[in-house]
């Protein structure tokens, strides 16, 4: 087998701007979190970002900070961002996942899957971002099944990287990760070559604005199809930029 495409990704729940109580608690986007988050993104240096809770004010500031070499789709809180000097977008779509509170005709960002198709140096691959229902294992499972079915129908299953806030930390039967694994999409810790190369692997992905806890409970994750081999990962403490820690992953295709 020969090495092919290399991609460095960031999976990031930004925590929407303007959430009630954040200003009073010292977590305002404009006055506190913006410089922290933008400096963190610059320091990580991804070429792809899978974003959740990337609200309008955050999208505007992130786009300005990244500059004209970057693009994103769509203009919603769940989005995929890419460096257009490294990757060429050839197609994209979004799919509303099943949910207990999905109302037809509304912009229900938290239950959406965004799937983008890229060409990078002649190699075709896909990137996906999503945000699942919190505190509801049944619907999280339904949403992962629907996401995997949609990715498979698009022909993206083997060459997809799927970063999301799945709001679930379990790997037990019926959980989003076990459903994804059965469908050929493997979470970062569930793919052997990456396991020994994940920094801060025990750090929880949700921090709740507090110092890191090291219980290994990831409610956020990045999944890869069979053609991707992750060779580096890091749970990156956001230190006040968000109430979630962020996941950095580098992966390579093998052919």
Image (cartoon, rainbow, N blue to C red):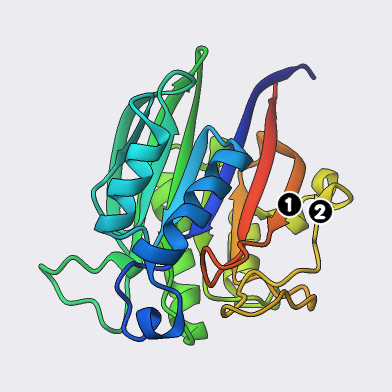
At which x and y percent is residue 157? Answer: 52, 42
Residue located at (69% from left, 29% from top) = 252
- SS assignment at label 1: strand
The answer to whether mark 2 and mark 1 are in CB contact below 8 A is yes
Quadrant where the N terminus sits is: top right
Say if 250 sits above or below 233 in the image.
above
Residue 154 seen from this side: no
Of residues 191 and 78, which is closer to you in this image?
A: 78
Q: Residue furthest front?
A: 31
- SS assignment at label 2: strand
Residue located at (52% from left, 75% from top) = 167
> Number of marks in the image?
2
At which x and y percent is residue 223? Answer: 61, 52
Quarter of the rendering containing residue 107: bottom left
Residue 81 seen from this side: yes
Q: Residue furthest left?
A: 105
At which x and y percent is residue 5? Answer: 63, 22
Question: Which residue corresponds to mark 2?
Answer: 199
Of residues 205 and 189, which is closer to you in this image?
A: 205
- Would residue 147 be found to the left or right of residue 99 on screen? right
Say if 218 sits above or below 151 in the image.
below
Residue located at (81% from left, 68% from top) = 202
Classify mark 1: residues with Cα within 10 Å, few (<14), some (14-19) or many (20+).
some
Marking on residue 234: 1
Quarter of the rendering containing residue 176: bottom right
């Amino acid at each position: 087998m020969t090495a092919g495409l290399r991609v460095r990704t960031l999976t990031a729940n930004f925590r929407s701007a303007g959430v009630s109580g954040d200003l009073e608690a010292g977590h305002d986007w404009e006055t506190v979190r913006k410089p922290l988050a933008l400096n963190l993104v610059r320091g990580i240096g991804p070429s792809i970002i899978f974003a959740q809770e990337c609200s309008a004010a955050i999208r505007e500031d992130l786009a300005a900070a990244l500059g004209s070499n970057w693009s994103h789709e769509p203009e919603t809180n769940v989005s995929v961002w890419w460096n257009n000097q490294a990757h060429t977008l050839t197609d994209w779509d979004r799919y509303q996942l099943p949910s207990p509170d999905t109302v037809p005709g509304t912009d229900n960002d938290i239950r959406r899957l965004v799937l983008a198709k890229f060409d990078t140096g002649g190699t075709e691959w896909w990137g996906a971002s999503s945000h699942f229902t919190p505190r509801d294992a049944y619907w999280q499972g339904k949403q992962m099944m629907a996401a995997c079915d949609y990715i498979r129908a698009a022909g993206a299953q083997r060459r997809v990287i799927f970063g999301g806030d799945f709001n679930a930390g379990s790997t037990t039967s019926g959980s989003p990760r076990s459903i994804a694994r059965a469908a050929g999409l493997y979470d970062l810790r569930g793919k052997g070559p990456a396991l020994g190369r994940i920094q801060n692997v025990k750090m929880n992905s949700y921090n709740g604005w507090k110092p890191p806890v090291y219980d290994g409970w990831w409610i956020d994750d990045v999944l890869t199809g069979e053609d991707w081999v992750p060779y580096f990962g890091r749970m990156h403490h956001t230190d006040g930029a968000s109430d979630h820690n962020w996941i950095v992953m580098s992966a390579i295709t093998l052919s």
